[in-house]
Amino acid sequence: MLDVARYAANTSKNNAAVASSVHCAINAIDALAVFYFGRRHAGGHEEALDAIRGAFDENEFRDMAKQFSGLIGLKTKRSTSQT
């Protein structure tokens, strides 16, 4: 998925780049949730970070949340621009 996101970004396929990047982030969060807590995230994209809350110190979590929120913001912007 990360290779797809990179390829899409490099070829100006912005919608595909954003969608692939969001899926990469969700997959990474799922992997962390399984590693730390033995369970996957089962909710919506916006709540994915809740699955790993407590696995990292507050500064690390805040940095991840900022990056993830940026991706979700791009996804939301992409989705609304297609309607």
Image (spheres, grey):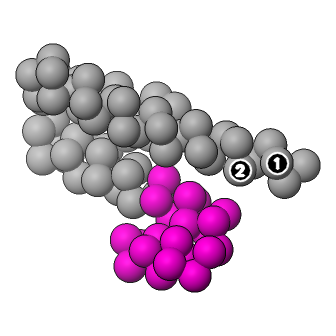
Residue 43 seen in the current view = no
Q: Which residue is mark 2?
A: 78
**Helix, strand or loop for disc 2:** helix
Residue 5 as seen in the image, left or right of residue 64:
right
**Helix, strand or loop for disc 1:** helix
From which residue to which does the magenta span run?
1-22
Q: Say which quadrant the N terminus sits in.
A: bottom left
Nearest the viewer among 26 and 71 is: 71
Quadrant of the rendered structure where residue 52 is?
top left
Residue 75: x %, y % from top left = 62, 47
| Up-down relation of residue 49 to residue 54 (above or below) | below
Q: Which amino acid type is marked by label 2?
A: Arg
Residue 38 as seen in the image, left or right of residue 77:
left
In the image, is residue 5 part of the stretch drawn in magenta? yes
Residue 39 as seen in the image, left or right of residue 78:
left
Residue at point 22%, 41% (across, down): 33
Q: Which residue is mark 1?
A: 81
In the image, is residue 70 part of the stretch drawn in magenta? no
- Residue at far right of view: 83
Quadrant of the rendered structure where residue 14 is?
bottom right
| Up-down relation of residue 64 to residue 57 (above or below) | below
Mark 1 and mark 2 in contact? Answer it, CB < 8 Å. yes
Residue 71: x %, y % from top left = 49, 44
- Residue at far top of view: 58
Residue 53 seen in the current view = yes
Q: Which amino acid type is marked by label 1?
A: Ser
Residue 64 as seen in the image, left or right of residue 47:
left
Q: Specify few, some or many for label 1: CA neighbours under 10 Å numbering under 14, 14-19, or 20 or more.
A: few
Quadrant of the rendered structure where residue 11 is?
bottom right
Nearest the viewer among 64 and 33 is: 64
